[in-house]
C-alpha cells in the first residue's frame, strides 16, 4: 500500500536510448559531490564565525534510467509493486529499434496512470493536438525541446514532482473522505435496517408485532382465497402473568415472555407466524390447515410446550395459556373480525378454568365486549365512590362471641347492581387497579373500625385481604401506617390476610415484610391454608398469628373422613406453633360441631351471618350482644410476639 503522501516523492525515470542524455539529466537533477561539499563548508563557517549559513535548498531527485520503452514500463510496474512509484518520467520521442515515445507513454500510463510525463524531442514528429488526441491526460504532459537548458529540466522536474505530490494528497484525502462516507453510509443503512425491524418486530422477543402481523394475516387471507383453503388464528394469553411481574419484578416477567416466545416458535412450522400482540398475549397464524381438528391439535401442542416450568431467579415458574381459536373464513372474513373472535374465545377459555383452548362460537364476542365495558367501568368506580365494604363476623367456635370481622369489598354498579369480587378482582389485577382498590379497602376498614369505637360498638378487630401484588409493593407498610394514623386507630385492631401463594413466592422477602407489620402491632393471617405450598420451616419463621382453613376442607368435613383428618392436622399443627385457627365457609351446625371437636378457635360463614353492609353489621352486633370486650391477651397468645406490641 502507498505510504502517506506527506513524504516527498523525488523519484524520476529517464527513458532514452542515448546514454549521454542520462548523464546530462543526472548532472542537472542529482546533487553533485561539489555541491554537498560547498554546503557543508558553509555550515562549518557559520558555526566558527557565529553567522547563519546562507545555503540554497536544491532538490535531490532519485533517478533511474531505462534505455528502451519496454524497459521503462517494466521498471514503472515494479515501482508500483514495491510501493514506490515514480513521480515523473522524461521520455525520448525516438528510441529505435523499440517503441517510440508515444507508444511508451501509452503503455506507461496503462501501468501507472498517475505518473507525470515530459516528452523530450528534437523533432516535430507530431503536432501537439495529435499528441493530446492520442494520449489524453494533457494535464500530466509537458513537451521539452532538445537540447534543453538545465534550468528548464530542473523546472520541469520540480514542478511535476510537486504536482504529483499534490495530486496524490488530493487523491488520499478523497480516499479517506470516501471511506468515511462509506462507513457512515453503512452505519445509516444498519440503523435504517434496525428501525425497519423495530417498526415490525417486538424488541423484547424479536417476534413480529401488530404491524407485521396484519401484513401476514393479509397475505394468509389472499393465499387462502386463491387456493380455496382455510387458516387458523390462535390468540394465546398467559394465565396469572401479572402475578409473576408483581411478585418477582418486570425483569423476571420479561425473561418468562422471552422463553414463551422461544417455545412457541419451536411448535409452529416455518411457514406459520408467531407474533407478540402486546403484554402477555401472543398470536399464532397457522396457514393451510385441513380443518378445526388441526387447529385444536396445534393449541394442544402449545399447552404441552408450556407445561414444563421456567426457572427464573432460582424459582420454577409454572405458566399455562388460555387459547382462543378462530378459523378463516368460517369465523371471520376480515383481520379485525378474526382477531376479535379469537380474543373472545380466549376469554371464554379463561372463564372455563384457564389452561385450555376454545374455538369461537356465536355469542362469545358479547361476553368479551361485556368484559371490556366492565373494565372501563372499573377504572371509574373508585373515583365515583361505587365501592362498599361488607363485614362478616368471625365467631369464637366455643363461646359464640364475636371478636373480629372480615371486610369484603362489593362493587355497587349503577346498572349491574352488586358486582361480586369474584367478577371484578381478577380484572382489577389484570388492568393494574388492584393496588389502588386495595389501598382504599385498608383505609375504609380502618375508618369504619374507628367509627364503631366512637359509636360505642363493642371493640372489634377488622381484617382485610392483601393481594400478592399489594403485599410486594414497597410502600405497603407506609400505606398501612398512614391509614391507621388518619383513622386514629391502634394497629392491634387491624388484621391482614394473605394467601399461601403470596407469602411463599419469595419467603425471605416475606419474612422482612411480615416482621415490619407485626412490629407495628398489625396481626397477620395466612388465608386458604392447605391449598398452597407452605414449607414447615418457613411457617415456623414467619411472624404470623392465624391460619385460615380453606372452605374446600370444610364443605364435606362431615361426609369425608379425609377432610376431617386434614382439618384436625392443621389445627394441631397451628396450636403446636401457638397459632390460632379460623375456619371459613361454615354453613351448618354439623360442620361447626366437627370444628369444635377438632379444637378450631374461630369460624366464619353463613351459619352465623352472611357478609353485611356496615350499618346492618353494627345492628347485628348490638342486637345479638355477642361481642365481648377486646382483650390484650387475645393478641399475645398467638405465635407472633411482635403482634402484642401496642403503640404508646
Image (cartoon, rainbow, N blue to C red):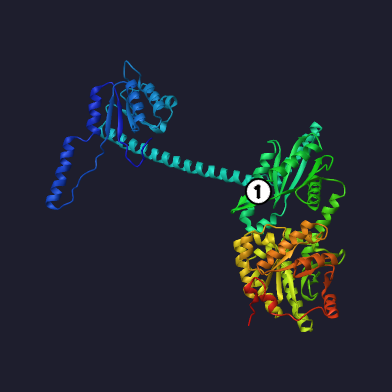
Taking the image as shown, residue 562 lies to the left or right of residue 207, namely: right
* Label 1: element kind: loop
604 w.r.t. 317: above or below: below
Q: Residue at x 66, y 69 (%)?
A: 578
Quadrant assignment for the C terminus: bottom right
Q: Residues within 10 Å of mark 1 (few under 14, many from 20)?
A: some
Task: Determine the image quadrant of residue 284.
Answer: top right
Is there any visible trace of residue 117 in the rendered image?
no
Quadrant assignment for the N terminus: top left
Towards the viewer: 526 or 490: 526
Residue 25 on image: x %, y %:
25, 29
Residue 524 on image: x %, y %:
68, 69
Q: Which residue lies under the disc numbered 1? A: 309
Is there any visible trace of residue 554 in the rendered image?
yes
Furthest residue toward left: 48
Furthest residue toward top: 97
Towards the viewer: 386 or 14: 386
Taking the image as shown, residue 105 lies to the left or right of residue 492, namely: left
74 w.r.t. 527: above or below: above
Task: Determine the image quadrant of residue 596.
Answer: bottom right
Amino acid at each position: 500500500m502507498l505510504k502517506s503522501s506527506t513524504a516527498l516523492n523525488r523519484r524520476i525515470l529517464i527513458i532514452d536510448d542515448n546514454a549521454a542524455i542520462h548523464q546530462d539529466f543526472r548532472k542537472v537533477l542529482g546533487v553533485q559531490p561539489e555541491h554537498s561539499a560547498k554546503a557543508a563548508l558553509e555550515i562549518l563557517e557559520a558555526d566558527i564565525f557565529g553567522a547563519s549559513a546562507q545555503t540554497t535548498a536544491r532538490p535531490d531527485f532519485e533517478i533511474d534510467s531505462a534505455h528502451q520503452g519496454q524497459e521503462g514500463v517494466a521498471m514503472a510496474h515494479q515501482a508500483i509493486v514495491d510501493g514506490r512509484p515514480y513521480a515523473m518520467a522524461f521520455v525520448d520521442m525516438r528510441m529505435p529499434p523499440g517503441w517510440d515515445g508515444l507508444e511508451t507513454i501509452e503503455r506507461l500510463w496503462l501501468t501507472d496512470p498517475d505518473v507525470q510525463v515530459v516528452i523530450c524531442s528534437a523533432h516535430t514528429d507530431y503536432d501537439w493536438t495529435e499528441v493530446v488526441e492520442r494520449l489524453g491526460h494533457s494535464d500530466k504532459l509537458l513537451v521539452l525541446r532538445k537540447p534543453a537548458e538545465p534550468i528548464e529540466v530542473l523546472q520541469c522536474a520540480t514542478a511535476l514532482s510537486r504536482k504529483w505530490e499534490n495530486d496524490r494528497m488530493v487523491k488520499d484525502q478523497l480516499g479517506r473522505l470516501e471511506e468515511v462516507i462509506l462507513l457512515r453510509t453503512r452505519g445509516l443503512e444498519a440503523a435504517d435496517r434496525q428501525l425497519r425491524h423495530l417498526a415490525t418486530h417486538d424488541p423484547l422477543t424479536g417476534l413480529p408485532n401488530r404491524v407485521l402481523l396484519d401484513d401476514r394475516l393479509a397475505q394468509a387471507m389472499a393465499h387462502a382465497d386463491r387456493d380455496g383453503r382455510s387458516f387458523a388464528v390462535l390468540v394465546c394469553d398467559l394465565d396469572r402473568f401479572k402475578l409473576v411481574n408483581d411478585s418477582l419484578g418486570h425483569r423476571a416477567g420479561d425473561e418468562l415472555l422471552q422463553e414463551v416466545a422461544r417455545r412457541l416458535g419451536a411448535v409452529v412450522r416455518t411457514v406459520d407466524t408467531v407474533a407478540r400482540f402486546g403484554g402477555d398475549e401472543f398470536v399464532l397464524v397457522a396457514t393451510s390447515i385441513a380443518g378445526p381438528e388441526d387447529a385444536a391439535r396445534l393449541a394442544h401442542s402449545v399447552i404441552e410446550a408450556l407445561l414444563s416450568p421456567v426457572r427464573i431467579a432460582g424459582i420454577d415458574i409454572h405458566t399455562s395459556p388460555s387459547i382462543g381459536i378462530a378459523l378463516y373464513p368460517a369465523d371471520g372474513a376480515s383481520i379485525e373480525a378474526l382477531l376479535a373472535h379469537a380474543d373472545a374465545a380466549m376469554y371464554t377459555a379463561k372463564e372455563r378454568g384457564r389452561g385450555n383452548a376454545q374455538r369461537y362460537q356465536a355469542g362469545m364476542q358479547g361476553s368479551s365486549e361485556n368484559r371490556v365495558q366492565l373494565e372501563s367501568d372499573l377504572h371509574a368506580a373508585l373515583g365515583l365512590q361505587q365501592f362498599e365494604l361488607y363485614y362478616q363476623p368471625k365467631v369464637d367456635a366455643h363461646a359464640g362471641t364475636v371478636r373480629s370481622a372480615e371486610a369484603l369489598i362489593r362493587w355497587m354498579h349503577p346498572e349491574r347492581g352488586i358486582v361480586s369480587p369474584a367478577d371484578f378482582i381478577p380484572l382489577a389485577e389484570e388492568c393494574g387497579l388492584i393496588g389502588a382498590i386495595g389501598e382504599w379497602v385498608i383505609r375504609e376498614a380502618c375508618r369504619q373500625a374507628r367509627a364503631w369505637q366512637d359509636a360505642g360498638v363493642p371493640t372489634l378487630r377488622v381484617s382485610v385481604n392483601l393481594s400478592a401484588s399489594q403485599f410486594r409493593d414497597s410502600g405497603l407498610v407506609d400505606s398501612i401506617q398512614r391509614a391507621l394514623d388518619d383513622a386514629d386507630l391502634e394497629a392491634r385492631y387491624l388484621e391482614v390476610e394473605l394467601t399461601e401463594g403470596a407469602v411463599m413466592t419469595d419467603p425471605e422477602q416475606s419474612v422482612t415484610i411480615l416482621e415490619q407489620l407485626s412490629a407495628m402491632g398489625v396481626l397477620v393471617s395466612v388465608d386458604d391454608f392447605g391449598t398452597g405450598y407452605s414449607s414447615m420451616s418457613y411457617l415456623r419463621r414467619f411472624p404470623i398469628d392465624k391460619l385460615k382453613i380453606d372452605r374446600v376442607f370444610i364443605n364435606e368435613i362431615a361426609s369425608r373422613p379425609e377432610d376431617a383428618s386434614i382439618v384436625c392436622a392443621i389445627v394441631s399443627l397451628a396450636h403446636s406453633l401457638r397459632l390460632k385457627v379460623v375456619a371459613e365457609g361454615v354453613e351448618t351446625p354439623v360442620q361447626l360441631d366437627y370444628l369444635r371437636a377438632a379444637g378450631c378457635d374461630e369460624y366464619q360463614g353463613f351459619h352465623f351471618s352472611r357478609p353485611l353492609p356496615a350499618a346492618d353489621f353494627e345492628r347485628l352486633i348490638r342486637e345479638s350482644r355477642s361481642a365481648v370486650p377486646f382483650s390484650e391477651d387475645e393478641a399475645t397468645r398467638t405465635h407472633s410476639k411482635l403482634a402484642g406490641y401496642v403503640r404508646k
